[in-house]
Every structure is written in C-alpha cells, then in structure tokens.
Amino acid sequence: MPYIIDRRLNSKNKNTVNRQRFLRRYRKQIKKAVSEAIGKRSITDMDRGEDVSIPREDVNEPVFGHGPGGRRDFVLTGNKEFVTGDRIQRPPPQGGGGAGEGEASDSGEGDDDFVFQISQEEFLEFMFEDLALPNMVKRQLADSSEFKLARAGFSEVGSPSQLNVVRSLRSAHARKIALGGKKRRRRKELRLELEGFVEPLTEAEESRKKVILDEIDVLSRKINAIPYIDEFDLKYNLTVKLPQPSPKAVMFCLMDVSGSMTEEIKDTAKRFFFLLYLFLKRNYEKIELVFIRHHNTASEVNEHDFFYSRETGGTVVSSALTLMDEIIQERYSPSQWNIYAAQASDGDNWQGDTEKCVELLTEKVLPCVQHYSYIEIGKRPPQELWYSYKEIQGGIFKDRFDLKAVQDNTQIYPVFRQLFERGVS
C-alpha cells in the first residue's frame, strides 16, 4: 500500500497560510459572492465581512484509488438471501423523486452547501482587487511615531539573549591564534630539530635534546594557558530603533448643498464619498477627512452637517475651491501629505463663476493633489461646469483629474471602478 507523506515545512502562521491557500482555491466563488453582496447592500454597509456559500461538490478533495485491471480477491461476509450469480436489486428511493411528486420522508440525507465567513479585510480585498490608486505617492514623514527594530552590526556589550555565538567563537579563535602563533611556530621548529637526532646520541646531543624537551614543555604550557574564550571575545547582536515612516493622506469632500440639491442627489454623493474613503483606507495607514459644503458661501463642517443640514440659496462653486486651497496651505503641506479630493454637484453654478473655478483648479488645487474626482449627479443634460471641467481633463493635469456623470445609486460602483481601474491614471 503506497503512502504519500507531505514533508513541506509549515509556516509559523500555519492557519493564516492555509486560509490564504483556501481563498486562492475558491477565488471564483468568493468573487461572485462579493459581487452579489455589493449589489444587495448599501455602500455604508461595506465595512463588514460576508457569508460565502460554495456547493458541496466543489470542495471535494482529490483521492487516490486503484486503477482497473488485474486480479483482486475480496472476502465478504455471508448472507442468507443471495448466491453466486444473483443480481442485486436497486434500493428503493428515499423521499420524493425530485420532480415534485411523492410524499415527504423523515429519512435520507442531503448535502448542504459549504458556508464560511470572510472577514472585512478579505471582503474589501476582493472588492478592490482590480483597482489601483492613480498617481499614488506614499511620502515619508520624519515625525512618525512608529519604530522598527533593525540590525546594526555587533557590539561588545549587551544582554545574554543577544549573544552571537558564532561571532564570539570566531573572535576567540582569532585571539588564540594571534597570542599563541609565535609559540606554536617555535614549538614546531623544536620538534623538527628533535626528529633530526639519530641514536646513539653523543653527550652534547643528549644535553641539547634535554634542553629542547624542556623548552617544548614550557611552550606547551603557555599555549594551553591561553583561555578558550575571554570576556573580550563576546560579541552581541546590536539592534537599533529606526523611525518607521507611515504614509498619510487627507481626503477633501466638496459638495453643493444649495436648494437644487435634492436628498436623493445627496444620498448618491454620500455613497461615492464613502466608497472613496474605504479605498483610501486600504492604501494609507492614516487618513484625515475634511468636509467642505457650499452654496453661495463655503464652510468646513463635520460629517453630520455635511450630509444632513439643509441650506437654501444659490451656488458659487469657487467658494469651496478657495476654502480648500486655504486649508491646504495652513494644515496640509503637499510635501508631507497625499491629498485627494472628491467633488459632488448637480452641475449648477452661478453665471460667471465657472471661469474662476477653472483658474483655481489649474493654478492652485491640482498642482497640490494626487487626484481630483468630480461627479455630476442627476438626469439633466450636462451643465456649463461640466464642459469647463472637461477641458481640464484633457489638459496637463489629465493624470490627476477625472470627471464622471452619475444618474442614480446603481451607477456609483461602476463609475468608481472606471475612475480607479488598474492601469488608468
């Protein structure tokens, strides 16, 4: 009977490795479940895991068996019903026949689907698998509060747990060679001279031989007196704490809250902002949010007021861009922060303000940001602001500015994927 023995070494995180192998094996089924979950739940509910169901036949493990052919003998138990040559009847069906007819049965078993839970991190991994941040630059900050231990050579002082045995023995061996090298060479010369005496020896040769033996004895004692290892030989691994740079990003959320912005449009904008925030969380360790709402004037507010407070009046988009530029200059230096911005609007703007918006974007905002996204929400034809922004998209900042039109909530995720599709800047 052949046996197959898996002698591959297990990783320290055996369970984690096995789970990753499992996720790779059933990637197709998991991606399908994630896609279905995205269509069923709201964007605000994207930060949790998901139950994934896999048909039982898809999780069967491969087995080894004997191939056909050859002669095989079996020893079976006896019975009172059959003799050699009889044919065994097919057993009666259990329960219904599967076509909707027959009566229910309290016996028989079926195969349930295999259901397991994927975590929030795994869910988002499959959700954002084909996406990549455009123009992403993780800048290193010197004021990082995180540190990483790094090897920095060897030291002659340290704790016993940091003792480097190989280096210590190597140092001890080198010291013994250096201290006893001259004595060993002299002892070797004397032994060669001693081998040159031929019996019978003269009185002078006998005297010389005795002197040589005494000197060899003295040299051997001196060589053996050299300590095997000395405190001077001990070497310790030296580790130092190095600042661990952490990438930081700030996300500006700009939204029109004038009278033309309905609650439905605001809800669609909220879903886009939240999806972008989740995406940035996967690429940056620390993210700050800045909410700027505007009608005829702009103001920085908290998240609740940003989405739910009601305003009336006209629309002056340049007021939001001006405030964003001021906040960047005061709190978020482009040399230290990765800056992202998303603007949501129904396209309305005060006549004559559009040119100022283009000027602010091209001269002050876009040179500082990694990416700027503009979505125009609604079922109306594109407005003047859309056409002016369209010219920016084809200019020198085309790698960090993009705009899309969205009609309702169902288009948020497809549009988001178009904006951040891998390979598209």
Image: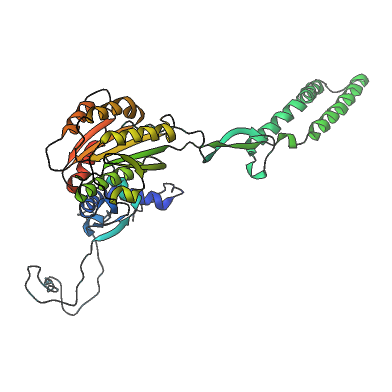
> 371 or 180, which is in the foreground?
371
Give residue 152's position: percent from left, percent from top: 59, 33
Horizontally, residue 85 falls left or right of residue 206, namely left
The figure's colour scheme reads rainbow
Q: Is residue 292 above or below residue 308?
A: above
Report the front residue among 56 and 62. Answer: 56
Residue at image location 31% in from the left, 57% down from the top:
117
Relative depth, front residue between 224 and 67: 224
**Residue 212, picture quadrant:** top right
**Above or below, comparing residue 86 to residue 153 in the picture:** below
State whether residue 421 appears in this view. Answer: no
Instruction: State which quadrant residue 319 falls in.
Output: top left
Residue furthest bottom as drawn: 80
- Above or below residue 344? Residue 204 is above
Residue 66 or residue 114, whichever sits in front = 114
Can residue 351 be seen in the rendering of this structure?
yes
Which x, y percent locates residue 381? 11, 37
Residue 225 is situated, as x and y percent measured from the top left of the image, at 81, 34
- Residue 345 percent across, percent down from the top left: 22, 40
Quadrant of the rendering where the C terminus is positioned: top left
Q: Is residue 328 left or right of residue 95?
A: right
All told, the count of numbered labels is: 0
Residue ranking furthest to the front: 313
**Quadrant in which the N terminus appears:** bottom left
